[in-house]
Image (cartoon, grey):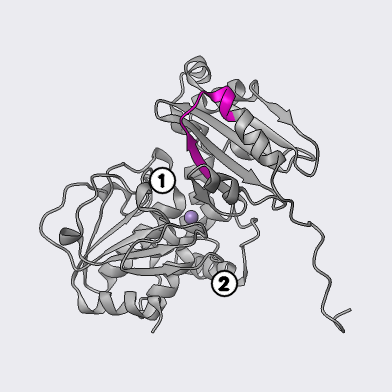
Amino acid sequence: VTALDEAAALIQRGSRFLVGAHARPDGDALGSMLATMHGLRALGKTAIPWSRDRASEYLAGLPGARELTAKIDGTFDGVFLHDLSDAALLNDNFPAREITGPVVILDHHATSKPFGDIVVRDSSASAVGVIVARLLSRLGVAIDKNIAECLWCSLASDTGWFRYPATDVETLRLAADCVAAGAQPWAFARATEEEEPVERLQLLREVLKTLVVVGEPPRRCAFLTVSDTELSAARAQPDMSEGFVNYARGLKAVEVGVLLADTRRGVRVSLRSKGGIDVSAIAAAFGGGGHHNAAGCLLPIPVDEARKVIAEAVAAAPVKSSRPSPPPDGAR
Ligand SMILES: [Mn+2]
């Protein structure tokens, strides 16, 4: 019996469920949890989307995003937590297990501090939406328009619009199924990336002034920093720097891009690799985690020190050969 079977059995047995994700949910977290919610409802179950945080403005148009709530009544037959590898990433006022019932983890992170009663984990899945689609398929739930829009959000978000290495045939077939069921790629792109507040671009202008490139290939590293200086110059909100780290990675001969966000809790470090360096190992060394090519951690030190510490960690990181493996004998 696989974890997926156990998760499906739990759904069939129960009637009332919570769905949730990590704090400050991104497109994969929110899209996948809402897809599960709509799938549960299609089976006639009650499903409530638990979140202390509201959906980011750019995701607020997802079907169900406005239902997010931290106020719940009664008890549940289980909770499905998405895109979550570490209980510490859950908001601290998450209800106790006596309220939620069994905890089911649907996740695709490799670095994990295991928790949960049923853990459906596939670190090769490009997005948690892929795992949710497998679960819904096991339950015989057809992808309707709501599910399709939420899964599309999950896939597009975590594959970087279908270009990161985990983008496989399963991902693209599911994407096609979503479009067939009513997901509209341009409508989603418009809502998320083609309606940016002016302050975000003004923030980018300020943040680009902080660019620092250190080291030599294959470990060259580019840093961008966002602190109160940049935020107030642009009159911008902290969450508007989402995605800026990709500008740092996207430079010629740079292997790792880093965004340092100076917050009251410390420096939030976002790391992005082109594949030659495992940034999840670097993040894990500082108590964080993530994926081979995308990871993060929180450093309770000043931002200049954080830059130095991360630069040293990248300079010391093992480099994976970027040469493609040779074809098997006879394949030439
Ligand atoms: Mn994810």
* Residue 235: % across, % down: 46, 18
Residue visible at 25% across and 79% down in the picture:
12
Relative placement, left or right, of 306 versus 79 is right
Could one spot residue 112 in this view of the protein? Answer: yes
Residue visible at 52% across and 28% down in the picture:
200
1 or 2: mark nearer the eye: 2
Could you tell me how far apart the alpha carbons at marks 1 and 2 are, in whole angstroms?
Answer: 24 Å
Relative placement, left or right, of 75 versus 249 is left
> What residue is pinned by disc 1?
59
Identity of the amino acid at label 2? Glu
Residue visible at 15% across and 61% down in the picture:
98
* Residue 120: % across, % down: 41, 69
Question: Is residue 171 part of the magenta span, yes or no?
Answer: no
146 relative to 9, above or below? above
The answer to which image quadrant residue 270 occupies is top right
229 relative to 253, above or below? above
Q: Secondary structure at mark 1?
A: helix
Which mark sits nearer the N-terminus, 1 or 2? 1
Viewer-nearest residue: 158 or 81: 81
28 relative to 92, above or below? below
Viewer-nearest residue: 46 or 272: 272
Circle 1 Cα neighbour tier, 10 Å, few/some/many (<14 / 14–19 / ≥20): many
Could one spot residue 142 in this view of the protein? Answer: no
Circle 2 Cα neighbour tier, 10 Å, few/some/many (<14 / 14–19 / ≥20): few
Identity of the amino acid at label 1? Leu
* Residue 311: % across, % down: 66, 34
Q: Please give the range of residues in magenta.
A: 296-306
> What residue is pinned by disc 2?
170
